[in-house]
Image: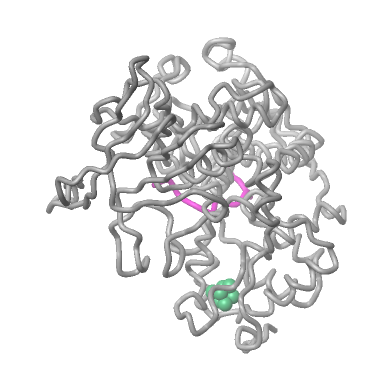
């Protein structure tokens, strides 16, 4: 039984971070590696703040956890110090809580009853509790391979090894199917490997989970582009079903601002991927911010990743621009599409380290030197207006122009769906108007026996949604192959 007054006795406290000067000297995670006993005591106190609500809004529903994480249950187990059972209950709904504990912007916390009022001291620190249970599970050996009792004799190909593909693969392997994950890159993990910077999640966290999947029997093939290195005919001949978890990596470009073609103006992923490769030991990044004035356009997660990466690369200055105002509250301001957290605009650790964020501004023009390299931007105050159909337009607020130095500009303005790939053409896959892969209520695409999950279906979204869709598509594939399934299906296609 939870302590219903715990939140009145203890205030919310987030995980302590390393000092800023120290974390800017390396690429390691920003959070302090605490002594386990000290960390566990602090997290037990945080778990004590949970009231075990009659209707736990954190746990599910439109605003809470898409995975249906059993948050009040494991909060109470942590409060009582039963970490092993807490681990069991956490893994019951989430294949990779160490990923979500580090990377998810925690819609559960925004939905927590205690987030309603500042007087309540803020939401339960659910993400901190989750990450600690997950890390404790590895430290204490609670995470072990879980192998299938019987084999179905069916074979499934999963295309893509990001969080959606890995979740689908693990669920289907555990259900007794032979699963082969194909990854076109040289290393596994998709965005977890080459999109997410090391300072948000060290790759050893990904690698230890991959070792569990391998020991359970999931097979992996890297450096293989399905549709090119393996034809669709081969795929159809060798597998009973296919899961497309190919992500939504087609970066939105700026097609209108004069000067976009200048050297030094890049899409965000063109900056993040080589930076992550450098952390993997592949040599210096081909696009580095060292010694440059850097402008990041776009106020979302990807923009924050570019921001922290540029800072660590030794940028002279980093400025992040957003057309939208800083919202005073998620509940009374729907103007910004960027992540907000109860009552305030989300601030990432990268924003605390250096640089500047500017709101209600837009670039009027990129200005280059004689060599065609960007050197300045012209900036204007703007406001975003919505017409009656919901279409947004950016309107200048004055004729005043501000000039900022800019040797490198990173466009982090979103993604436009799946990349063009021969695999989709050869399978005859239909796309939605948003450039994502369409599917029926059973996650099956226009190609029979071919299913889709994660960003490829949903569009660029949160890691928690990718895992939830991976789990759900596994249920659908299992049913397709065997006629029924006991696997969970936490979400339905949108
Ligand atoms: Fe606990 Fe908050 Fe969930 Fe209520 S909404 S059960 S206080 S975490």
Residue 52 is left or right of residue 410, and the answer is right
Residue 302 placement, left or right of 416: right
- Residue 433 position, x and y percent, is 28, 34
Q: Is residue 35 left or right of residue 203?
A: right
Image quarter for residue 133? bottom right
Tell whether 308 sits left or right of 178. Answer: left
Of residues 1 and 348, the one drawn nearer to the viewer in this rendering: 348
Quadrant of residue 419 within the rendered picture: top left
The residue sitting at 61% across, 26% down in the picture is 157
Residue 171's place in the image compared with 250, above or below, is: below
Magenta stretch holds residue 487: yes
| Residue 423 seen in the figure | yes
Residue 379 image position (x, y, % from top left): 27, 42
Span colored in magenta:
483-494
Q: Quadrant of the N terminus?
A: bottom right
Q: Nearer the viewer, residue 260 or 158?
A: 260
Q: Is residue 241 above or below residue 303?
A: above
Magenta: main secondary structure equals loop
- Residue at the image position 49 percent from the left and 26 percent from the top: 270
Whether residue 437 is visible here, answered yes or no, is no
Q: Residue sitting at 32 percent across and 20 percent down?
A: 261
């Amino acid at each position: 039984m939870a302590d219903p007054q715990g939140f009145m006795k203890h205030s919310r406290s987030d995980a302590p971070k390393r000092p800023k000067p120290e974390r800017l000297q390396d690429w390691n995670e920003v959070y302090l590696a605490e002594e386990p006993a000290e960390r566990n005591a602090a997290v037990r106190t945080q778990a004590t703040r949970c009231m075990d609500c009659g209707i736990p809004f954190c746990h599910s529903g439109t605003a809470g956890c898409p995975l249906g994480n059993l948050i009040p249950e494991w909060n109470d187990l942590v409060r009582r110090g039963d970490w092993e059972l807490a681990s069991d209950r956490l893994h019951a709904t989430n294949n990779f809580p160490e990923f979500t504990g580090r990377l998810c912007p925690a819609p559960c916390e925004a939905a927590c009853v205690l987030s309603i009022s500042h007087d309540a001291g803020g939401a339960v620190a659910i993400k901190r509790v989750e990450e600690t249970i997950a890390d404790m599970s590895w430290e204490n050996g609670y995470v072990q391979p879980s192998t299938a009792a019987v084999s179905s004799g069916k074979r499934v190909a999963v295309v893509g090894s990001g969080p959606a593909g890995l979740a689908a693969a693990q669920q289907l392997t555990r259900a007794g199917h032979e699963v082969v994950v194909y990854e076109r890159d040289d290393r596994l993990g998709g965005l977890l490997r080459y999109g997410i910077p090391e300072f948000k999640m060290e790759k050893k966290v990904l690698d230890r989970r991959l070792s569990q999947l391998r020991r359970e029997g999931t097979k992996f093939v890297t450096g293989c582009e399905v549709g090119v290195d393996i034809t669709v005919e081969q795929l159809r001949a060798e597998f009973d079903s296919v899961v497309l978890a190919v992500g939504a990596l087609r970066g939105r470009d700026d097609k209108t601002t004069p000067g976009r073609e200048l050297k030094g103006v890049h899409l965000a992923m063109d900056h993040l991927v080589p930076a992550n490769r450098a952390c993997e030991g592949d040599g210096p990044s081909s696009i580095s911010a060292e010694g440059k004035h850097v402008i990041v356009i776009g106020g979302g997660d990807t923009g924050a990743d570019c921001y922290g990466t540029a800072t660590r690369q030794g940028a002279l200055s980093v400025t992040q621009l957003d057309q939208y105002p800083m919202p005073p509250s998620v509940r009374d301001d729907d103007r910004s599409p960027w992540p907000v957290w109860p009552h305030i605009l989300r601030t990432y650790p990268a924003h605390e380290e250096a640089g500047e964020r500017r709101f209600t501004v837009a670039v009027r023009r990129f200005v280059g030197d004689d060599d065609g390299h960007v050197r300045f931007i012209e900036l204007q105050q703007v406001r975003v207006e919505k017409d009656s159909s919901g279409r947004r337009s950016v309107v200048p607020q004055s004729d005043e122009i501000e000039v900022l130095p800019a040797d490198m500009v990173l466009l982090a303005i979103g993604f436009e769906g799946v990349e063009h790939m021969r695999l989709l053409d050869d399978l005859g896959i239909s796309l939605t108007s948003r450039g994502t892969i369409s599917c029926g209520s059973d996650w099956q695409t226009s190609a029979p026996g071919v299913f889709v999950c994660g960003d490829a279906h949903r569009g660029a979204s949160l890691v928690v949604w990718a895992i939830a869709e991976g789990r759900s598509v596994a249920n659908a594939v299992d049913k397709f192959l065997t006629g029924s399934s006991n696997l969970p299906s936490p979400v339905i296609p949108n």
